[in-house]
């Protein structure tokens, strides 16, 4: 097997310990390169035997406006960026900004904006509720938004027809560490084993010999994608949008004496004095 590091694309390793030694000798530079990355999507990275069919809740759509609830990211899975998002990764970013952009394929252009004010929040969940055939807890970061058919007919139909099966997060790293297999360091081996135990797919850590443990990140946007770096990011529901009734009091028409008549009467009274 050939081992690689995204941060050093020209480097190739035929032995896991060669990769480990390179990581140890270049930790500072590796961390700087990783922290400077803007993460979006990548290729699929979950074993096929873990995947089961996920069926979203899609109403019979009769409205020209729909409300969509989608999973943008799930924690506790090593994705194709070799990142293991820890459970608290999104706590600060959703507290600081409870709204998010929702884009098409990470297109930061006006024509790619599905919603510029999607509700952004976290939900406790389980991978067996999101498309994996395994009982393992996760935190799902959610975008919930409305979409009119007139604004973006293709994406409207894609959600209604159940064609949007994955999503991806545009994010910036805030706090992370690297876990790597190192038989020469008991401390590092303990960290490697303890961290991979928090992943639904620890075999990825064993296969590649390293992964990033991401404690905090800043969410910039969520996107509908064909393939995400984390494939366990389904559309949860698509419903007819029913706007909330206004709480403002209706203004009743004034059937009293018209304003001009009142003015004329006032002038008449003054003249008669």
Image (cartoon, rainbow, N blue to C red):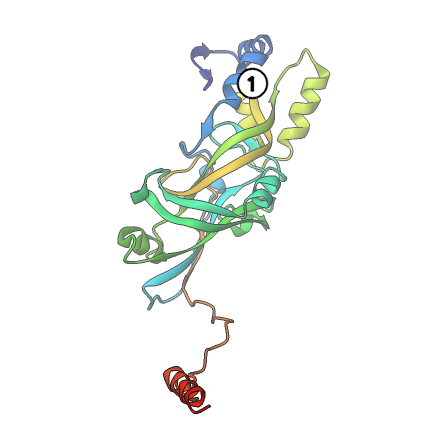
- The spot of residue 87 in percent (x, y) is 62, 40
Q: Is residue 148 left or right of residue 262?
A: left
Q: Which residue is located at x 58 percent, y 43 percent? A: 96
- The spot of residue 89 in percent (x, y) is 60, 37
- The spot of residue 229 in percent (x, y) is 44, 34
Q: Is residue 44 left or right of residue 125?
A: left
Q: Is residue 28 left or right of residue 9?
A: right
Q: Nearer the viewer, residue 87 or 143?
A: 143
Q: Residue furthest right?
A: 186
Q: Which residue is located at x 42 percent, y 43 percent? A: 167
- The spot of residue 214 in percent (x, y) is 59, 30
Q: Secondary structure at mark 1?
A: helix
**Quadrant location of the N terminus in the rendered image:** top left
Q: Give the residue pinned by disc 1.
A: 31
Measured along the vertical axis of the image, is residue 16 above or below residue 115? Answer: above
- How dense is the environment of label 1, judged by Cα within 10 Å: few (below 14), some, or many (20 and up)? some
Q: Residue furthest front?
A: 273
Q: From where the camera sits, is residue 23 visible? A: no
């Amino acid at each position: 097997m050939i081992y690689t590091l995204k941060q050093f694309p020209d480097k190739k390793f035929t032995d896991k310990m060669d990769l480990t030694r390179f990581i140890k000798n270049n930790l500072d530079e590796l961390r700087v390169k990783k922290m400077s990355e803007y993460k979006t999507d990548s290729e699929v990275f979950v074993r096929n035997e873990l995947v089961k069919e996920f069926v979203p809740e899609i109403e019979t759509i009769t409205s020209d406006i729909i409300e969509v609830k989608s999973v943008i990211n799930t924690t506790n899975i090593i994705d194709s960026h070799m990142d293991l998002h820890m459970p608290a990764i999104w706590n600060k970013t959703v507290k600081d900004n409870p709204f998010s952009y929702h884009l098409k394929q990470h297109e930061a252009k006006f024509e790619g904006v599905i919603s510029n004010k999607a509700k952004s929040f976290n939900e406790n969940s389980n991978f067996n509720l999101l498309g994996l055939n395994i009982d393992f807890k996760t935190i799902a970061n959610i975008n919930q938004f409305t979409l009119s058919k007139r604004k973006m007919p293709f994406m409207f139909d894609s959600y209604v027809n159940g064609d949007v099966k994955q999503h991806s997060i545009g994010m910036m790293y805030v706090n992370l560490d690297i876990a790597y297999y190192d038989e020469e360091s008991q401390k590092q081996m303990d960290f490697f084993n303890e961290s991979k135990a928090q992943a639904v797919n620890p075999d990825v850590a064993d296969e590649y010999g390293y992964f990033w443990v991401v404690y905090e990140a800043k969410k910039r946007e969520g996107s509908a994608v064909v393939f995400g770096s984390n494939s366990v990011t389904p559309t949860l529901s698509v419903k007819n949008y029913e706007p909330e009734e206004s709480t403002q009091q209706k203004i009743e028409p004034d059937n009293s004496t018209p304003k001009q008549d009142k003015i004329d009467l006032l002038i008449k009274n003054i003249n008669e004095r």
